[in-house]
Image (cartoon, rainbow, N blue to C red):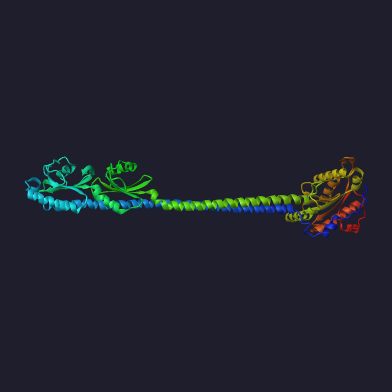
Amino acid sequence: MESDKTVTSPFTEQRTRSREELRLDPVSREGHQDSLRRRRAWGALIGLWLALGVLGVWIIDDVLSGYREADARVRSQALVYAKMVASHDRFELEMADQIIKSLLVHMDDSLFNGQVSESRRVAFEALLAEHRARLPGIASFTVVGEDGIRRFGVVGKNFTDLSERGYYKVLKAGQDSFVSPAESGLASGKAGIHVARAFRRVDGSFGGLVVINLAVQDIFRPYYESLGLEGARVQLRSADRVLIAYPASEELAPMTPLADALTPLLAGGKERGIVDDGAWVSAFERLQSSSVYAEASLSREFFRHEPDRAALLALSALFAAVLAGAALTRAIAGGLRAHTELAVAYIDQRRMTVRDKLTGLHNRYYIDEQFVGTRDAAIAKGHSVALIFVDLDRFKAVNDGLGHRAGDVLLREVARRLHLAGGEASTVIRLGGDEFVLLVDLGPAGDDEAVRVGATCQRILDAFGPVFDLPGGPVPGSASVGAARMPADGLEWDELAHKADVAMYHSKRTGRSRYTLYQPELEASLEMPA
């Protein structure tokens, strides 16, 4: 099966092409660039979401800090209001006690326990009325004798037995003054507080008392109304009930959940303190030595209006940033998908360009860059590389005699056998027609390189030993093989390709079905006949 074609080195044409056209493996390069784009894009997205996460943590911490500051402010303000209200209420009780003291200076035992003339009684009742006018909220004045019987006063019935009243018992037992708990119905049907002081004879014995009944709503409520405290509720209370509250009903209020928390504190005689039931923060302070307390309750919700607005704005900004981040993520992901689809399409197209459709091998356009990569890797490792040209003998006779289909089957089988013969360290390339190239990593450079190249070439020739089963029947096969070595025969592709081509031509000229290793004296065979 002698070929009648002129054997022309495929590299003669190749040397006329620009190196850029033959710069191979753009597929790997495009895949690498696509991978870099993806890594950079995902790195940017990860950075973006980390930044959003940090921003979110900062915003949430700032919001919580605003609420903590509001809670601290409401507790501090409650304590200030309670003290302010207690100071006022305490002053009112002290003023009532001072009025009694000023009256006792002008009183003697006869007014408490003797016969009082009508004119003297009227004079003292006028004096009591005058003092009552000094302190709005005084419901009544009463002078009580040693025996507990009311002698006279302003508002009330004379000669009433008051010996069972708490203030009488306490003062007769030896205490000089007394402030009662608030009691219902003692001040014209309103809650009242008794402020009483004992009259002591010269020998110190108990001679009677003067008691003022204060209408708590009349004496304390006007001040509460004048405060105008926003978000606050002011109360005067005992352990078990609210006496007056502003803003609230003037009627005695039943116990509330807040009172449930306050009751044990007030009943235990605690002077001052603070209670937090979640919705309200309440501070309280006791008035003098009584069981009456001033209380200021502040709405937590009122003090949270500003942090609520700040939280709404901050969380809205965070939500907008997250939406923007999501939109950007979608855009980048979409761009990546588009880039990847383009890269895949490009890779598929390039594979079609650099791959031989018939055999699946790389084609001539893959050679240059593959050679450069193999060369550089070998140099880095100190290895030698063989460049082996294989040209089928009498291939045209197969095509002409059995048809192109048989020729195609033969080429595919040759490609398979060359892969096996070259081994894992080889790359098989179809140049075109019946011409193939193998790039073989020979391992570490050494004196036995020629032996290793020869062994590889012999395996290639042996691969053609078994007949080829083709559609038209079995056909024997053979090939002419030529090899050059790197770095022994050169480092550049053009030089090595020329030398391997010369060696392959020598094999074909001297009988075919053999291999030749390049020697300088083979250059005389450059004129290659058909």
Relative placement, left or right, of 223 versus 134 is right
* The one of 452 and 311 positioned closer to us in this rendering: 311
Relative placement, left or right, of 416 versus 257 is right
**Residue 403 location, x and y as percent?**
89, 44
Q: Quick check: can you spot residue 65?
A: no
* The one of 477 and 292 positioned closer to us in this rendering: 292
| Residue at the image point whose x is 19% and y is 54% from the top | 134
**Residue 474 location, x and y as percent?**
89, 40
* The one of 173 and 9 positioned closer to us in this rendering: 173
**Residue 127 location, x and y as percent?**
13, 52
* Count of numbered tags: 0
Res 372 → quadrant: bottom right
**Residue 257 location, x and y as percent?**
34, 41
Res 381 → quadrant: bottom right
Relative placement, left or right, of 431 versus 231 is right
Q: Quick check: can you spot residue 122?
A: yes
| Residue at the image point whose x is 32% and y is 51% from the top | 79
